Image (cartoon, rainbow, N blue to C red):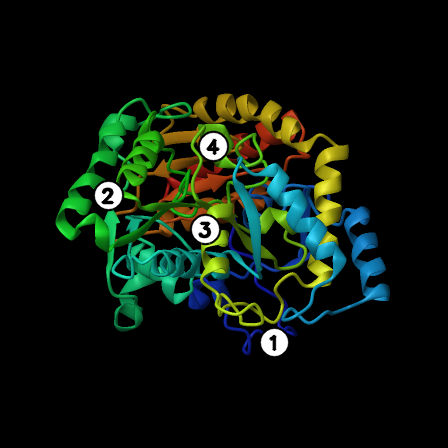
Amino acid sequence: MTAALKIPAAMDMSAYWLPYTPNRYFHEHPKVMQSAKGAYYYDDHGRKLFDGLSGLWCSPLGHADPRIGAAINKQYQTMDYCPAFQMASEATFTLASRIAKMAPQGLDKVFFTNSGSEAVDTALKIAIGYHRVMGNASRTRIIGRERAYHGVGIGGISVGGIVANRKMFASMMMPGVDHLPHTYNLSQMAFSKGQPTWGAHLADDLERIVALHDANTIAAVILEPVQGSTGVIVPPVGYLQKIREICTKHGILLIFDEVITGFGRLGANFGADRFGVTPDMITFAKAITNGVIPMGGVLVRSDIYDAIMAAGGQEQAIEFFHGYTYSGHPIPTAAAHAVLDIFESDDLINRAKALEPVLENALHALKGQSGILDIRNFGLSGAIELDPIAGKPGLRAMKVLEACIEGGVLVRIAGEAIAVGPPFISTPAEVENLISVLGDAVDDAMKLS
């Protein structure tokens, strides 16, 4: 492995506090991108890097598609901002209708936010508000899942289950939260292709939690159909179906966090479609604007909306005291319309579906390679689990990332895992090369001790 390249001395990096980044390490091993086009980034050393994780799971169309830029510019010239309270732009209504038509039947109301984190906190508030107006004010408890990532809002870290996201902020977190066990078991699931066949019984732990707390105290369960940020953990066959059945049995709302899995990543509009399980709410963000401009939202079952409206008092009174200055902002709305147009015109979800076996075959060809403890995949996403360096958690993964950059690809670190999720516009050859470079990078990193 070659030595890390240093950033030019003339660039002052002192003011910027990087998010979700080991800042001290970064300053010694900087990674600075300068431009992006199609499925590639270009860094400050002139390297062309294949975007192996679609930005941060958010750019399935690649980068700099002129159709998105044209839509944004046109909207800017027409109306750059419209107040989100008491009024809205026409395009925001039509976007909500388009998204609702893509969603599972019955989820036909859309509340717009600016990010996945805001979408999660919004969904939690809707769940608790719904039970309150239904006369079930005792239903305030939320059930999350271990290893879950639901953004960085107070609600999101409370229901999330990644320890590093929670430990510093324990005093701020929501009361009345419990967690299901995660579904990852290396001894039973290693090297599964698609959904593991072992583990559906883990859903039964929800019955234990219901018995512990009483169903009449539980408002909702929130989970990701596929856990992305913790390293692509795929649900066992039948697991999501059992969770749905238990929630229905006890009158508990089920929220799918589809910030990563929504809009084609699993070869369907939403993960709910791919798994054949309909939740009561779906959170979305990322791909809705291809990562060009922040936008998120919550798809909500119509009777939940109707119940809150019916309890709103006089018609001039606000029914739900929640929202953001930039909810349904005209500029990201224009970007989202353009993105959905491109999804349709370029048949991108089917293109993603066609690339799924290419990624699966390439990933699982690495089985048996030294340093790889597990390989897992679903849809156009996958991960490998690395054998860590003793006493230095995360260092092996960091060295794999750096070796991948030297080899011309970008991947994503998730603890001791390396995640991949290429753009839907990728060619089979590009996907195969991504995994080939990843395999070589693991070989390089295994030389470290």
User: For the point 68% across and 41% down, which residue is it?
Assistant: 61
Q: Amino acid at mark 1?
A: Asp
Distance between the alpha carbons at the discs numbered 3 and 2: 28 Å
* Label ID, residue 304: 3
Considering only order in the chain, which callout, 4 or 3, is on the residue closer to the N terminus?
3
Q: Amino acid at mark 2?
A: Pro
- The residue carrying pointer 2 sits among few (fewer than 14), some (14 to 19) or many (20 or more) residues within 10 Å by Cα, namely some
What x and y, as percent, mark residue 150?
A: 41, 54
Considering only order in the chain, which callout, 4 or 2, is on the residue closer to the N terminus?
2
Check the image and name the residue furthest to the left: 212
User: Dot 4 corresponds to which residue?
Assistant: 439
Distance between the alpha carbons at the discs numbered 4 and 1: 35 Å
Foreground pick, 271 / 131: 131
Q: Is residue 202 left or right of residue 91?
A: left
* Residue 344 vertical placement versus 164 (above, below): above
Q: Amino acid at mark 3?
A: Ile
* Residue 177 vertical placement versus 48 (above, below): below
Disc 1 to disc 2: CB gap under 8 Å: no
Q: Is residue 174 left or right of residue 91?
A: left
Q: Secondary structure at mark 1?
A: loop
Considering only order in the chain, which callout, 2 or 1, is on the residue closer to the N terminus?
1
